Image (spheres, rainbow, N blue to C red):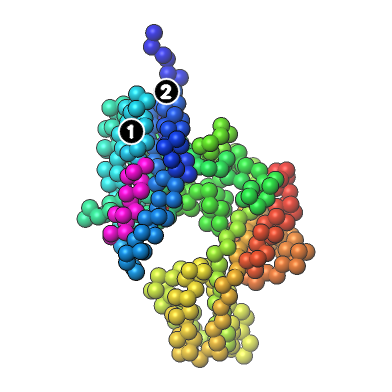
Amino acid sequence: MTEVKSYVALIVQKYGGTSVADADRIKNVARRIAATKDKGNQVVVVVSAMGDTTDELIELAYRVAREPGGRELDVLLSTGEIVSSTVLAMALRDMGYKAISLSGAQAGIHTDSAHSQARIKKVESKRVVTELEKGNIVIVAGFQGVTGEMDVTTLGRGGSDITAVALAASLGASVCQIYTDVDGVYTADPRLVPDARPLVEISYEEMLELATYGAKVIHSRAVELGELYDMPILVVSSFTQNTGTLIHGGASMEVRNKVVGIARDLDVAKITIVGVPDRPGIAAAIFQPLAEAGISVDTIVQNASIDNITDLTFTVTKGDLAGAMRVVEPIAKLIEARECVSDSRLGKVSIIGTGMQNTPGYAARMFEVLSGQGINIQLITTSEIRITCIIDEARVEDAVRVLHRAFKLETGQ
Ligand code: ASP
Ligand code: MG
């Protein structure tokens, strides 16, 4: 008698580098994929490169060239995902399943030509669909695409998440499952806060803020795509049987959470231009050349001016600090500012939650809690659902812990 399949759905699963780090783990992942297929689902799998492969390839490139970036580097890096996708397909075939691996180009991931940070322009998933119709499990190499000129591109570090959600959206999958080495999205990094809780669900907008402000569990561009195409994303462990966290925009999101999570980011440096004459055009004169140099500026604060002289402070990543100083110092001279000072030992701590919208008191509470620990706040930025304080990097971990307790995240309020 043939088995009656309970349902047929199209599921996209993405497995990160840790989940496919060696042969045993690849076989373990193959078993999970097989179990999903056995339930009657069509399965498309996106993989990252095995373990630290991408880092090792980058290192190799820098051993032979001072600036290996661009076309050749992208082809080199794309091979990491080619290896993991082919080997996974072999493992599945060895178990008796029909499986085929496809490169990003073969899977129809078309991007612009910004090497090492390409953006997906469109997904032509015809080939994937054909292979699914033949009964194959389709294994797609993540993190890569192809330009109109057939040059291979990569999407930026951690970009396999983006491939997975883009494919899921274009195929009209019922869910995009991101398999990783943690049990889902936590209220804070559980390595820092032992009683942090995994969240059952979170909205796209909250997850986007968490990911953008430091939570490493999923790429922020993948969350953006999820929101845009209303593709539910399940973040789940490939090592345990836990249920994970569903990122979605569903109805239960009407029950608004106050603070859902705390994010941290240690990659913050600050530049202050002191004694800037306060007149129209000055901000443009400073930030235009920074943009042209490809330096993305984060927080910008201009003090109220006294006698038409003001201070202008902004933050960049630590890696961009030297480059930003090289751009800004000559401009500061030109506009007759007093001096430029920088500080590279900063970090960000953010509280995030849709429930903070239109509810006064969260900012005050956050500042009070930090000051209670003697933590000095250097800069503050907010969105409707986020408050971020920039503080000494050495105090960031303390700040996460005390805020987690103060907002009672260990109990779910
Ligand atoms: N292998 C790439 C990286 O390490 C892409 C990914 O892991 O998603 O950045
Ligand atoms: Mg990786």
User: Disc 2 or 1, which lies upstream in sequence?
Assistant: 2
Looking at the rendered image, the disc whose residue lies closer to the viewer, 2 or 1, is 1
Q: Which residue is mark 1?
A: 90
Q: Quadrant of residue 306?
A: bottom right
**Picture coordinates of residue 315 (x, y %)?**
54, 71
**Which residue corresponds to the image point at 63% horizontal and 66% vertical from the top-left?**
393
Mark carried by residue 66: none
Mark carried by residue 38: 2
**Which residue corresponds to the image point at 39% horizontal and 8% vertical from the top-left?**
1
Q: Is residue 224 above or below residue 316?
A: above
Amino acid residing under circle 1: Met
Q: Is mark 2 within 8 Å of ligand 1?
A: no
In the image, taking residue 6 as reference, residue 384 lies left or right, namely right
Q: Main structural element of the magenta stretch: helix, strand or loop?
A: helix
Q: Can see residue 55? A: yes
Q: Is residue 374 above or below residue 31?
A: below
* Quadrant of image for the C terminus: top right
**Picture coordinates of residue 108 (x, y %)?**
28, 44
**Which residue corresponds to the image point at 35% horizontal and 64% vertical from the top-left?**
63
Given residues 52 and 412, the one toward you in this image is 52
**Which residue corresponds to the image point at 26% horizontal and 43% vertical from the top-left?**
106
The local secondary structure at tag 2 comes to: helix
Given residues 336 and 26, the one toward you in this image is 26
The local secondary structure at tag 1 comes to: helix
**Farthest residue toward the front?**
63
**Picture coordinates of residue 202 (x, y %)?**
58, 44
**Picture coordinates of residue 269 (x, y %)?**
55, 71
**Farthest residue toward the right?**
372
Query: Does 310 lie within the magenta span?
Result: no
Amino acid residing under circle 2: Asp
Q: How many marks?
A: 2
Bounds of the magenta span? Answer: 71-84
